[in-house]
Amino acid sequence: MTDIALRFGGRRNPPVAVAHLREIPVSAMVVLSGLVLLLVSAFLPWAVNVGSGQTANAFEPNLPWLLGGTDLAQQTAGSFGNGWILIAVVVVSVAAGYPLFCGRRMVAVPLASIGGAGAVYVYFTSYRFDNQFSKIEGLVVELGSGWWLALAGSLLMVTGGVIARVGAGNRRAAVATTGPVTLEALSGNQDRRDRESAVRTIMLVAALASILVSALIVLALVRDALTFMINIDWASVWSSGWFPRRGFYDIKTLVVSTGLVVGVSTLIATPVGLGAAIYLSEYARPRTRRWMKPTLEVLAGIPSVVFGFFALQWISPNIIQHIDVWFGQDARLGNLAAAGVGVGILSVPLMASISEDAMKAVPHSLREASAGLGSRKVTTTLRVVLPAAVSGLMAAFIVTTARAVGETMVVFIAGGGGDTAVYTHNVFDGSLTMTAAMASLASGTDSVVGEGLTFESLYFVGLLLFVLTLGMNLVADRIVRRFQNKY
Amino acid sequence: MRLGRVFDDRTRRAVTSEVYRRSRDVRGGVFRVLLQIALLVALLVLAILLVDTVTDGWSILSGRLGDFLSGGLRSQSGDPELGVFQGIRGSLWIAVFVIVLAFPLGIGAAIYLEEYAPKSRLTSFIDLNIRNLAGVPSVVYGLLGLAIFVRGLEGLTGGQSVTAAGITLAVLVLPIVIITSSEAIRAVPQSLREAGYGAGATKWEVIRTQILPYAAPGILTGTLLSLSRAIGEAAPLILVGAVTGFLGGQSGLVDISQLQERFTALPIIITEWVQESGRDRGFAPAAAAAIVVMLVVVLLLNSAAIFLRNHFEKKR
Amino acid sequence: MTTVTDSVEMAMSGGGAVPQASEAPPAVATAAGGEAFPPDTVFRVEDLNCYYGSNRAVRDVTMDISEREITAIIGPSGCGKTTVLRCFNRMNDLIEGARATGTLLFRGVDLYDPRVDPVEVRRRVGMVFQKPNPFPKSVFDNVAYGPRIAGSVPKSELPDIVEASLRRAALFEEVKDRLKDSAIGLSGGQQQRLCIARAIATNPDVLLMDEPCSALDPISTAHIEELMHRLKEEYTIVIVTHNMQQAARISDRTAFFTADVDAETNSRYGLLVEFDDTERIFSNPSDERTENYVTGRFG
């Protein structure tokens, strides 16, 4: 007994200086180190240039990148040519972080030194000797313009601070396990608890980032959409076509063609997706499933531009331009029907996987009960499994539809719309859906310009799209939650 | 036989035919065939798509693959320097941003939601929020990028730069990373957690030594899928201002200075060439070849993810 | 005893590298009433109530657990045996909404004092669970887990600790050639003994066992029971068991819990019926409910 007890008893006291360092709260270290680096990199160029009495334009006193970039930033951008080394530095620093985190200083310190040396090397070699600045000024300027360097530096410093603080918990010898039980002994190790709260805070911040993203989305959309809605002549929102650069923003053109595309896609995705799901969930043998499911997942992983290409180059000439005569139409290469078929194919895996999940959630006992009453598999599937899974299937349908509404590239490529669109309710015509209109407004030109509210119209359509899909997803979510509770 | 005495032949035949009626179940057979057709259609489309794309792009892929991979955006399809190098470079940077920003944030958020978060209103709000973010159309993320990262933070990102695009796509895949990582963490057995706590580990120690190693394959699967999604995504890039015409500057593959410059990416090049093919037919094979290049990357990532998941699912 | 504890306490708080905050705790916590805590008592439970949310699941438990004895907790399912056991190392803290009121002193220290770190408690009060739950790591890493995360042991001493712990858990001879193999490959009984080795590797004062044999076959169960007899010489053991024969065989003292229904809220709760020497509980219990249970007329 005693042999272990004695070993546990060894208690090493860290140096006093280190002990005091650990008194600083993690949050303060994080905030402070970040702030200091930010401020230094923002103000140093200005401070140097005041000190050196320079008056040239290049040294105009301002807050360089913090408030929107400078000439200097432009001048020195591109001076940093050691990307590979920088990446290596980052990798080494990260690699150094883990052992440090686990308290293995003997591994961490050499790695960190290599990383640090690499950083210094990159820093000096990146300086451009052919410009007019003196070396030290050049360095400072570089520090100011290289926002990413400052950012990386503060990140490193912050992580360093956290790691130092967090790792300390590991380095400190724990209170002897076999010592007498006292309140102090049981209140444990301050460092360990600090590390816990530090980690918890980091994770919470990460989770809050998602809220920030949604807030930013809404903010970004609403601000410019409001400008549009306040200043727009509403007659132009209900006219005969979408000519954003000429001030005609007919929403109904976009909405109707969106509806046409979604309609065609639903006609494809629902039967094919549902059928595949039923087969996989009820009929397929495990061996069949084993290769079929991954194949469907491959289909799901294909980027939508590829379906755009496929819809325009294959579906349209080989299918749509053959069947259009049945309807007395003559379709051009780009048309809404081809886009709809493309979107439909793209939605099949989504429809199939959510539907299959819904049917898998139906308890096996229900199927057995039905089979026990002498039902055939068709009857069991159609009369028992599908009704039991109906809410999940509804959710699958809604989610797939929402996805089709938001699909951009297929429609943009194969929908046959240009920059503008005339109102149509014919699937064999080319037109612009909401998403395609946004893409075409934003593409081709360096920035969205045109008549006064052209730019804002982008956000108006975006807000409409956002609200529409959000509503559908919320409804689907509701349905899914309800059917999850059922079993 | 005893049965023979009780039932006469007629009854026996009726029973036998009832029991073996499978062959006469027309309705069931038709239903089954319909289902198989549905599945077949899906697979057939996949096959046609792949074959059609490869055939279209074959002339380039077999003839001048090396030049194609190192060439740039050109206005004429016959230009011998036409290629996708700038697109690969842009997509590579986007992947770097996704890995650096979305992965740590997403995994951190998942750990918080599964291990730390109390059952509070804030938690369920964050949860709902993430699920809805996953359903927001990608083009809306493009608007976000345009408003915030291109215009709002122009000083930081350099405007319509690969930085703005990278951050936008990182934000786009963040909810996917969170959701898949959460699922992987939820699948860790409770007994493992209890064993860790019982041995005197703190929460973070349990997470670091037990939960993360156990959930790692699942998390990796999710991150690979989201990475391939980010690489194939085009709509947000169009809004953020990816270059579709000529893009100057032939710097190396990894050169930090590009971070604040104009950029393009593989899916954007494909879009551009498909659209240009109406004017200049020669762009169609170029687009197909570019698709093959992109699909190789994307499908490799996807298959790796699917394989990983199936492999570890079977193991447990 | 009080003076010894006192001086150690002072030495520790005085010599520690990190001074405690100004609201330092009183040097020695004492049992209610002010008398010194009896040295051979490990836990003193007084009027312990456990809640899940607003539901009072266990009511008014009072018992003392003595050093180097095996205390068995028996009773029908749903009587709060496990809940009480998990109070002793504050494992209930991990369940959302679970809390406890009343007094629970661990060698004189209030376990539910806000200054007490449950993690530290769990290092001193080890736990073995119902189902063997080794980590999906090597045998060695399983046993070394506790000392490693505690960071109190130099790496070079880990092999000795692992060996000593495995020997104490009567497992070393069986696994000495496959210390690097995954613990998942061991048999159920070996896994449970590995879990015991893992628990004693942090050198705890007490071992809590939550139906440790319920998932094992009779032979493995016999192994574990034998092991417990030996472990008793060094550790205080509290065991929850379904199996009355087991309690009779191995324990020195037995607590019988039963479940009752609250007339007002119509919710089930557990309560301690009788706590006495095992022999008395099984031969001559003072409560009729105990007698009914141990004679098999109920439950």
Image (cartoon, coloured by chain):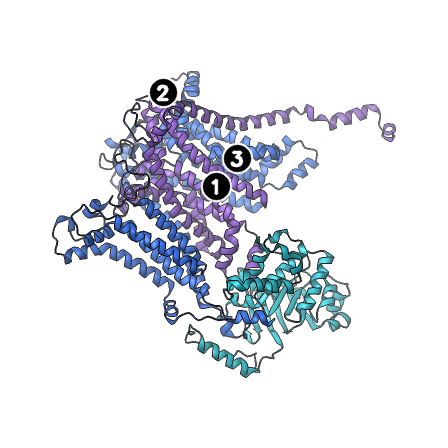
Chain colours: A blue, B purple, C cyan
Label number found at residue A67: none
Mark 1 / mark 2, whichever is N-terminal: 2
Residue C128 on image: x %, y %: 62, 62
User: Badges 1 and 3: C-beta atoms under 8 Å apart?
Assistant: no
Q: Residue at x 70, y 35 (%)?
A: A373
Badge 1 and badge 3 in a common chain: yes
Residue A466 on image: x %, y %: 37, 40
Quadrant of residue B226 within the rendered picture: top left
Rounded to the nearest angstrom, the CA distance separating label 1 from label 3 is 25 Å
Q: Closest to the observer: C95 or C55?
A: C95
Q: Secondary structure at mark 1?
A: helix
Rounded to the nearest angstrom, the CA distance separating label 1 from label 2 is 36 Å
Q: Amino acid at mark 3?
A: Pro
Residue C140 on image: x %, y %: 58, 58
Q: Closest to the observer: B152 or B64?
A: B64
Location of mark 2 (residue): A332
User: Badges 3 and 2: C-beta atoms under 8 Å apart?
Assistant: no
Location of mark 3 (residue): A294
User: How crowded is the residue under tag 3: few (<14 C-alpha within 10 Å), some, or many (20+)?
Assistant: some
Residue C238 on image: x %, y %: 64, 68
Label number found at residue A476: 1
> What chain letter is assigned to the residue under label 2?
A
Q: Closest to the observer: C268 or C62?
A: C62
Q: Secondary structure at mark 3?
A: helix
Q: Closest to the observer: B49 or B293?
A: B293
Quadrant of residue B191 within the rendered picture: bottom right
User: Badges 1 and 2: C-beta atoms under 8 Å apart?
Assistant: no
Instruction: Determine whether A253 is above or below A40 in the image.
Output: above
Side (left or right) of C259 relative to A450? right
Mark 1 / mark 3, whichever is N-terminal: 3
